[in-house]
Image: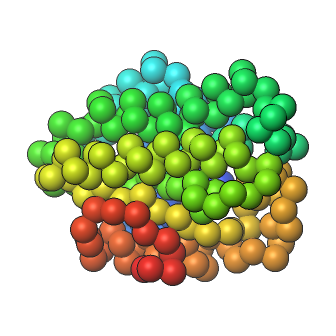
């Protein structure tokens, strides 16, 4: 089995990559930081493709590395502007960048990989957030991108009946992103303790396409 995981140099992406590698999956891993990603790929006997998911040329490099793909995990994302600003003063260039990374990057990758995913009756995991649904102060920009990703997932699920399309809310995790948002990341569980086991159950059980929170799994 072969999987492509974006944002795989830390956090949930790294934890999931380690779990899948232990079970013998062939992995293609994406992240922007070359030293970290290349070391992780060497440790996991995986293929590293360094770059920015918002860059069409980088997405093409990922497609070239991903023949015969069974699973695409769109995990790479950005918070957008930090410290998290209120929407009234949100810098629009930062919001455009967040949509490019969190929405258009995943969709662009899905579009290019759908032929092989259809052929192999593969699956797509789009990592979302409860900020897509809840009105958390300061989280409007990030939440808007994840709400858009949720709706893309909903429509893809209706259109692509040969591919499982799951939008997954992993909940709060002890990650750098949560710390960068000004939250108490140390109080949150590690991704490998909560989110990864839930994702593994999702991938193994292959339930109907839809939106799932870790607690559902």
Q: For this view, does 206 lie left or right of residue 83?
A: left
Residue 211 sits above or below residue 35 on the image: below
Residue 51 sits above or below residue 83 on the image: above
Q: Residue at x 57, y 42 (%)?
A: 145
Q: Residue at x 61, y 69 (%)?
A: 171
Q: Where residue 162 sits in the image (x, y, percent)?
A: 14, 52
Q: Answer whether residue 132 is visible to the viewer in this image.
A: yes
Q: Residue at x 84, y 31 (%)?
A: 89
Q: Where residue 104 sits in the image (x, y, percent)?
A: 47, 31
Residue at the extreme top = 57
Q: For this view, does 202 lie left or right of residue 216?
A: left
Quadrant in the picture for residue 32: top right
Residue 65 sits above or below residue 8 on the image: above
Q: Residue at x 68, y 30 (%)?
A: 95
Q: Where residue 136 sits in the image (x, y, percent)?
A: 74, 58
Residue 199 sits above or below residue 97 on the image: below
Given residues 149 and 70, the one toward you in this image is 149
Q: For this view, does 188 lie left or right of residue 55?
A: right
């Amino acid at each position: 089995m072969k999987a492509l995981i974006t944002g795989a140099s830390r956090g949930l992406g790294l934890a999931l990559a380690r779990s899948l590698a232990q079970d013998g999956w062939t992995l293609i891993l994406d992240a922007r930081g070359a030293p970290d990603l290349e070391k992780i790929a060497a440790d996991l006997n995986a293929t590293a493709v360094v770059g920015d998911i918002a860059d069409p040329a980088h997405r093409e490099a990922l497609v070239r590395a991903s023949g015969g793909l069974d699973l695409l995990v769109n995990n790479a994302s950005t918070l957008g502007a930090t410290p998290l600003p209120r929407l009234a003063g949100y810098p629009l260039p930062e919001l455009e960048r967040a949509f490019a990374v969190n929405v258009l990057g995943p969709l662009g990758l899905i579009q290019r990989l759908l032929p092989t995913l259809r052929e192999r009756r593969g699956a797509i995991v789009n990592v979302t957030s409860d900020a897509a649904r809840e009105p958390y102060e300061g989280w409007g920009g990030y939440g808007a991108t994840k709400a858009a990703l949720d709706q893309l997932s909903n429509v893809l699920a209706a259109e692509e009946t040969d591919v499982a399309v799951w939008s997954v809310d992993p909940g709060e995790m002890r990650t750098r992103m949560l710390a960068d948002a000004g939250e108490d990341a140390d109080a949150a569980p590690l991704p490998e303790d909560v989110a990864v086991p839930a994702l593994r159950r999702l991938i193994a059980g292959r339930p109907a396409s839809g939106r799932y929170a870790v607690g559902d799994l």
